[in-house]
Image (cartoon, helix red, strand yellow):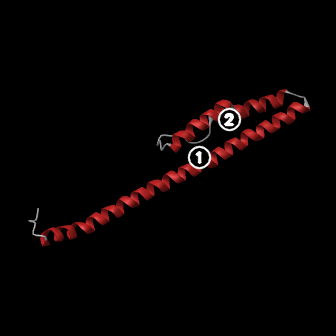
Amino acid sequence: MLLAMDEARVRLEQNRKGAEDVRQGHIEQAEQAAALVEQLKSSVQDAGYQSVLAEVATHIASFGEKLGEYTDLLGREQQLKQQLQQRAEQVMAQVDHASTPKRRQCRLSLGETPG
């Protein structure tokens, strides 16, 4: 489970830094930890251990769900950021296009030769 948490940390840091090749989806180590818990549950008969293992399984599942939710949010945030950046570029291009004739007119009225 510690390996799964470390993998999640690495992915989240890469995503925060804007890396585009961040792996998404399930973390294999978390799935392996869940499988190990299930194996232990089937082999251990002590009620106390069964209770602890059930709680561990719940925490592993919750970890996976929360991580999935968070990475989905980061993905949507990244998409929104890209859309806003594209829109800003479009607006700047429109402003540049609209102001170019006015700049030319100003230069001509100041006596500059067209260039």
- Amino acid marked by disc 1: Thr
- Quarter of image, res 64: top right
Question: Image quadrant of residue 34?
Answer: top right
Asked if the residue at tag 1 contacts the one at tag 2, i.e. Cβ–Cβ closer than 8 Å, the answer is no
Q: Residue at left 62%, top 37%?
A: 27
Q: Residue furthest top?
A: 43
Q: Residue at x 41, y 56 (%)?
A: 85
Identify the amino acid type marked 2.
Glu
Q: Residue furthest right?
A: 47
Q: Residue at x 84, y 34 (%)?
A: 52
Residue matched to label 2: 31
Q: Position of residue 25 (x, y in %)?
A: 59, 42
Would you say 17 lies left or right of 113 here? right
| Count of numbered marks | 2
| Disc number placed over residue 71 in the picture, else none | 1
Q: Quadrant of the N terminus?
A: top right
